Amino acid sequence: MSAERKQLLEERLLALQPSHLDIVDESHLHVGHAGSKDGASHFRLYIWTPQFTGLSTLARHRLVYDRVQDLMPYPIHALAIVAKENF
C-alpha cells in the first residue's frame, strides 16, 4: 500500500519538474503513533526544482502541499520536506 502512495506522491510532484526527487517511506518509524492509525503513511521528501528559485522555505513547502493537499491527513499523515532549488 505504501508503494502505491509513494507512486501517487511522485506523480503529483512531477508537475513541479524536479531535477531530483526522492521519497522515503518512514511509516515503520511511526507505528503506534496516533497519526498512523488506520494505516496512514509517513514520508520524507527530498525535492530539488528550479521552480523554488527565490522562494522562502515556507513558500517551497506550500508549493509541495498544494500538489498533495487532498491526500492529507489520509492516506498520508505526515510529509517531512527538504526542498531546494539546485541538486
Image (spheres, helix red, strand yellow):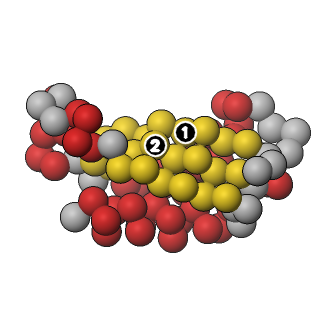
**Label disc, if present, on residue 37 of the rendered structure:** none
Q: Is residue 34 left or right of residue 50?
A: left
CB within 8 Å, label 1 to label 2:
yes
- Quadrant placement of the N terminus: bottom left
Q: Is residue 56 visible?
A: yes
Query: In the displayed structure, would residue 35 be above or below residue 1?
Result: above
Query: Which element type, helix, strand or loop, lies under badge 1?
Result: strand
- 65, 26: nearer the viewer: 26
Query: In the displayed structure, would residue 14 be above or below residue 85?
Result: below
What residue appears at the point 73 percent right and 62 percent down from the top-left corner?
19
Residue 83 image point, x, y percent: 66, 42
What residue appears at the point 71 percent right and 51 percent down from the top-left corner?
48
Residue carrying label 2: 44
What residue appears at the point 60 percent right and 58 percent down from the top-left corner?
21
Residue 23 image point, x, y percent: 48, 54
Residue 87 image point, x, y percent: 76, 50
Residue 11 image point, x, y percent: 51, 70
- Residue type at mark 2 is Arg
Query: In the displayed structure, would residue 55 be above or below residue 13?
Result: above
The earlier-in-sequence mark between 1 and 2 is 2
**Label disc, if present, on residue 81 of the rendered structure:** 1
Query: Which element type, helix, strand or loop, lies under badge 2?
Result: strand
Mark 2: few/some/many CA within 10 Å (<14, 14-19, 20+): some
Q: Is residue 4 left or right of residue 24?
A: left
